[in-house]
Amino acid sequence: MNYIDYIIIIVYLVAFLGIGYLFKENKSSGDYFLGGRSMGWLPLSLSTMATQLSAISFISAPAFVGLKDGGGLQWLTYEFGVPLAMAFLMVALIPTLYKSGIVSVYEYLEKRFDASSRLLISFVFQISRSVATGVMVYTMALILQATVGVDFWISVLIIGVITLVYSFQGGMKAVIWGDVIQMIILFLGIVICLAYGISELGGFDNFLTNVDKERITAVDFTKWGFNNADKNDEFGFWPMIIGGFFLYASYYGTDQTQSQRLLSAKGMPTIKKLLLANGLFRFPLTLTYCIMGLVLGTLLVQDLGFQEMMESVYQANIDSLEGKKADLMVPVFIINYLPNGIIGILIVAIMSAAMSSLSSTVNSLSAVTMEDFVKRFKPEMTDSKYVLTSRLLSLFWGLVCLFFAFFAGNIEGTVIEVINKVSSVFYGPILAGFMLAIMTKKTHALGANIGIVVGVLFNMYLWLYVPEVFWFWWNAIGCLVTVVVAMVVSAFIKRKVNEGLEVVYSPSKKEVALLLGFFAFIVVLSIYMPKLLS
């Protein structure tokens, strides 16, 4: 890196401080947390994908595809459930949630059931999301320290302070427009790495000749995920579709970091476009960074100098990077193979991956804390006091995430896998809670609460005592167990059922047909991927 790269990084960071100032006028909860419900589908779509495209997508996913044992294009199967989940949310859940006028998505559970469901799920979200985001910032800072030479604590503070300032000032509008810029930079970074990697290999034909053929198989119909004690039964076709459907329906429909964007839309036509765009654009984006991973992995095998540079960086930082050598592939390539100026842009891309996830998390954590807890005790708060308190909560949750980032080194070796499993323990039952609230009329609060608890406990039992079941299945199993138990309890134990909430279903035949057609297309494309890359 030279002065050009540092100038690019400084300009980028200063520009984001300006974004917060630009959107500093927030007069109510609707302004600060929902952007005044004035956002169009394109910025919301890019913001949603930027939040999803974090450190794992930009660094760890290409490393998994290109280098890690058991890796390869089977990563694409993560995307199979997305179009199906978007179609379901578009028709069944989101119209009702949007029309209810809520800020925290968990507020709907109290309107339909009671406060206990809302507060429990909200609390779980706050703890799990802040820990996960802290680990993500930790990982990014660690990579920057190893490759660029910026001290770990300085990287954490730069990422954290800049993000907190513009999130504190600008609220949801600053977060969304910041994500739009970051998404463009991230995608540009992926394309640049892909293009330079192919150039270093001597062209696309040479890449096709030398790529590891075992890594280009994306779909495996023989793996069902029920004999996974040794982790050789993962990424099968059916568990990734069925489990993925429940995971993504819960993540995009009931996780505050994502649902808050849906609630920020101008209206249902905007939401339809947003869900459609997310269902259609995620796969091409994922395919692009997966191909990048294959290209860089192939270059690493062919280029002894690349191997030596990675080994040198790894050995110099082995105490902090033990077991994470593959994750150095992308940043080491950036630093050593790209020209100055481009390096600065791609270091900005790495920082963007952290900042977009952190800003979204901070704003969402502030929203649920404010709506689910603070307003419960101070319901008559003025708008000005509300916005000030919300900003202070954003600052508080940002500091909590940075605290976890500083201390994640003690647990980070397995924490990413653990967080994924923890999410899958809860995602299915939480989705079931919203399905019961919106799609059934006779389920009461006691039945729903018992169902959610039993669903979570059953998933924990699978985690602890049935390792043969692939964790992707927990999303489906937990949802089905919750629904069955809740409906049985509600049938046999008579309680008052809250009424008066209007349930809205959206006629979206064209959008649903397009999503289902796209689902079939990406599955067929993935099946034939070995032929296309051979």
Image (tube, helix red, strand yellow):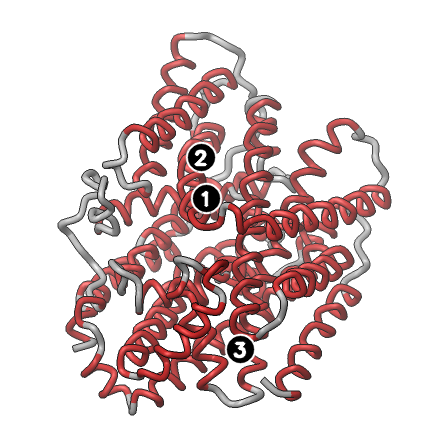
Quadrant in the rendering for residue 375: top right
Q: Nearer the viewer, mark 2 or mark 1?
A: 1
> Residue 391's spot in the image, x, y percent?
77, 49
Residue at x 57%, y 60% (from the top left corner): 44
Type of the residue with mark 2: Phe
Q: Residue tagged by mark 3?
A: 346
Tell me which label, 2 or 3, sits earlier in the chain.
Answer: 3
Other residues around mark 3 within 10 Å, as few (<14) / some (14–19) / many (≥20):
many
Q: Which mark is residue 426?
A: 2
Marks 2 and 1 sit apart, C-alpha to C-alpha, by 11 Å
Residue at image location 30% in from the left, 87% down from the top: 201
**In what element is the residue under mark 3?**
helix
Residue appearing at x 72%, y 49% in the figure: 394
CB under 8 Å between callouts 2 and 1? no
> At label 3, which amino acid type do we have?
Leu
Question: What residue is disc 1 on?
Answer: 419
Secondary structure at numbered mark 2 = helix
Residue 198 in the figure: left or right of residue 90: left
Picture coordinates of residue 7, whole percent (x, y)? 68, 83
